[in-house]
Amino acid sequence: QVQVVESGGGLVQAGGSLRLSCAASVPIASIDIMGWHRQTPEIQRDFVAHIMSNGETDYADSVKGRFTISMDSTKNTMYLQMNSLQLEDTAVYYCFIVFRGNFNWGQGTQVTVSS
């Protein structure tokens, strides 16, 4: 089983930035896909972004142009740079790692955007 540890959440004003980190217990080169979903009390867990082992990325329409996903294989860590944050971005953000075809989730990190 892959250990997934998120960090970097917090409170930020609208228009501000945060960077989330997701550390994996296995080499990133062995991971199929890494990414983020987010969840609020009103909605189910929704896709935010992912990055594949070949570097290909994909984003939800709501975050395109504002969020950037990347990874550092030397640290076995993936990042989500979130800029121009909006109130609607408030959620618990969950990192996921697909390893050998299995989904592994982190515990979640809270992001709160205030006006």
Image (cartoon, rainbow, N blue to C red):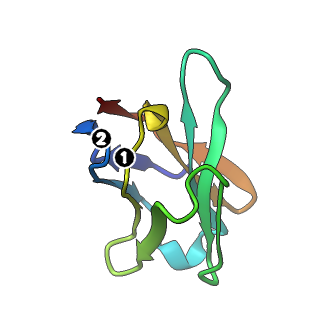
Location of residue 32 (image quadrant):
bottom right
At 54% across and 79% down in the image, what residue appears?
A: 29
Judging depth in this view, the residue of 55 and 113 nearest the camera is 113
Judging depth in this view, the residue of 61 and 31 nearest the camera is 61
Mark 2 or 1, closer to the camera? 2
Q: Are marks 2 and 1 in contact (CB under 8 Å)?
A: yes
Q: Callout 1, which amino acid?
A: Glu
Q: Is residue 74 above or below residue 57?
A: below
Q: Answer whether residue 107 is visible to the viewer in this image.
A: no
At 66% across and 54% down in the image, what residue appears?
A: 60
Element marked by disc 2:
loop
Q: Is residue 68 above or below residue 18?
A: below
Residue under pointer 2? 9
Q: Residues within 10 Å of mark 1 (few under 14, many from 20)?
A: many
At 50% across and 73% down in the image, what residue appears?
A: 28
At 33% across and 81% down in the image, what residue appears?
A: 74
Q: Label 2 to label 1, Cα distance in Å? A: 8 Å
Determine whether, in the image, residue 82 is placed left or right of residue 39.
Answer: left
Determine whether, in the image, residue 5 is placed left or right of residue 29.
Answer: left
Determine whether, in the image, residue 13 is placed left or right of residue 83.
Answer: left
**In the rendering, at what x and y percent does residue 43 appear?**
65, 23
**In the rendering, at what x and y percent does residue 52 appear?**
64, 73
**In the rendering, at what x and y percent does residue 105 appear?**
55, 42
Q: Residue furthest top?
A: 41
Q: Callout 2, which amino acid?
A: Gly
Residue under pointer 1? 6
Judging depth in this view, the residue of 78 and 3 nearest the camera is 78
Q: Is residue 100 above or below residue 1?
A: below
